[in-house]
Amino acid sequence: MRVRVGILTVSDSVSRGAYVDRGGPAVQQWLQTALATPWETVARVVPDEIPAITGALEELCDTERCPLVITTGGTGPAPRDVTPEATEAACSRLLPGFGEAMRAASLALVPTAILSRQTAGIRGSSLVINVPGSPAAVADCLAAVFAAVPDAVELIGGPRLETNPEVVAAYRPPHGR
Amino acid sequence: MRVRVGILTVSDSVSRGAYVDRGGPAVQQWLQTALATPWETVARVVPDEIPAITGALEELCDTERCPLVITTGGTGPAPRDVTPEATEAACSRLLPGFGEAMRAASLALVPTAILSRQTAGIRGSSLVINVPGSPAAVADCLAAVFAAVPDAVELIGGPRLETNPEVVAAYRPPHGR
Amino acid sequence: MRVRVGILTVSDSVSRGAYVDRGGPAVQQWLQTALATPWETVARVVPDEIPAITGALEELCDTERCPLVITTGGTGPAPRDVTPEATEAACSRLLPGFGEAMRAASLALVPTAILSRQTAGIRGSSLVINVPGSPAAVADCLAAVFAAVPDAVELIGGPRLETNPEVVAAYRPPHGR
């Protein structure tokens, strides 16, 4: 039984076929190096519309039963960027530390990291994490937070995830927190 | 006249007597080393329920007149962790810099620091600060923010607090901000 | 055609003439060193009242057509400090990375940086950024985020801003994010 990981590409241009998806494959590729547990991708592409994004998150979490969903794209300040709003709408609670840590890590590389409004949240037994659409930012952001993802997934009732320690060493606190 | 400091342990298991409180005593012990002003503890223990937590915060701030209240526990991502929500409900305004600084300081020590949703806020003339339940995290988090606590308490109408400079040097800006 | 930059001083005492404005001139002076594009100031002073602040933000963004508005003052924890609330009310979306980065930069200088609740947001095609009232904090905070401001202003439909690279090097990502 493979763990199902949702990868949701949020992009008007990719959605209408005008542009090839680069964010989704970047997430896929990073997870392939990082995850040691057998897993499979449940990929979706939606335009930059709140109902489309929340609908896809609901499907990936509730129907497809993905304990982990990574969105890519739509996190910036432009009027069409609404992924954080859709994530907040789909999740029962937010985890502000993810956005803070991803922005802080990216800020060490590019000053415009502060423009990303990315967040993370919990829907049922699923952890949803926003990363930007740029392939370089995808890897930087996932690397900044993924050591905490296995513990988070377990705390909300998901399966045990193992990582490849040469990419990221999953950390589990000794006994609760 | 001693300054009253509220210490609120939020834990289902401690509340029902199944587990000894470790977070509350850790807060108490850290404050004993840090505070030079004569003070006394007003301790409470409640289960992980929003009404119980907000009720205790109201009592500690409004009835017991504690200018400073530290909560411990219930800040994680698990479904029963609701201390941040209860704090937000009890406070008229939040101070996001406390959560950011505590997570950043803890993140230098453990990757799962980003899972804590702890915040701080103001209720009337009381400053409320969330720290995690783990005794080690209690000290790390209080050390990360306490230099700003005396100034914050005064700005909201509370008493002057002095600290032991070898533990934490209270900072007061030259003239307002 | 000069770019119009709104500078909004939020202060009861300055507003009633009891105290000379130091925050507004500090913003003006910092921008004079940082901005290479021809620009002019649209200055306003209001008391620490939410309706007065939101009203001034609406005027500066909608009527005066300032693509960039910097507020100074009213970001602290004191009961009269309401600039963040007024900014949230006037903006359709917030950019949490600005507050995080400004607090982190200030925290390296003064422990009380965590008490500032400053944020940034977007109203129409205008970027609104809060900085504290203290002249020293004005420069520290603007220096911490301004490299991302020209990209942000363009992404929301504003003009191209050039900076003096010896003060701050505006960064624009290669192609979208």
Image (cartoon, coloured by chain):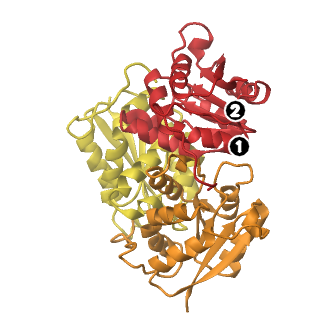
Chain colours: A yellow, B red, C orange
Please provide percent x and percent y for residue C176.
39, 69
Determine crowd level at label 1: few under 14, some 14-19, many 20+ residues with C-alpha closer than 10 A.
Answer: many
Ranked by sequence position, the earlier of labels 2 and 1 is 2
Q: Position of residue A115 (x, y in %)?
A: 47, 62
Examine the image and state in which quarter residue A111 appears. Answer: bottom left
Q: Is residue A153 above or below residue C145?
A: above
x%, y% of residue C105? Answer: 45, 55
**Which part of the image, by quadrant, shows the N terminus of chain A?**
top left
Residue C27 placement, left or right of C172: right
Q: Is residue A157 visible?
A: no
Dot label at residue B156: 1
The residue at which mark 2 appears reads as B67
Amino acid type indicated by mark 2? Pro
**Residue B106: x percent and y percent?**
42, 35
Chain ID at mark 2: B
Residue at the (54%, 30%) spot, across then down: B131
Towards the viewer: A140 or C136: C136
Give the left or right position of residue A79, taking residue C170 as reference: right
Q: Chain of mark 1?
A: B
Q: CA distance from mark 2 to mark 1?
A: 9 Å
- The type of residue carrying mark 1 is Ile
The dot on residue A150 is none
Report helix, strand or loop for mark 1. Answer: loop
Question: Residue at the spot x=43%, y=42% of the render?
Answer: B104
Element class at badge 2:
loop
The furthest residue to the top: B18
Q: Nearer the viewer, residue C68 or A135?
A: C68
Q: Dots 2 and 1: beta carbons under 8 Å?
A: yes
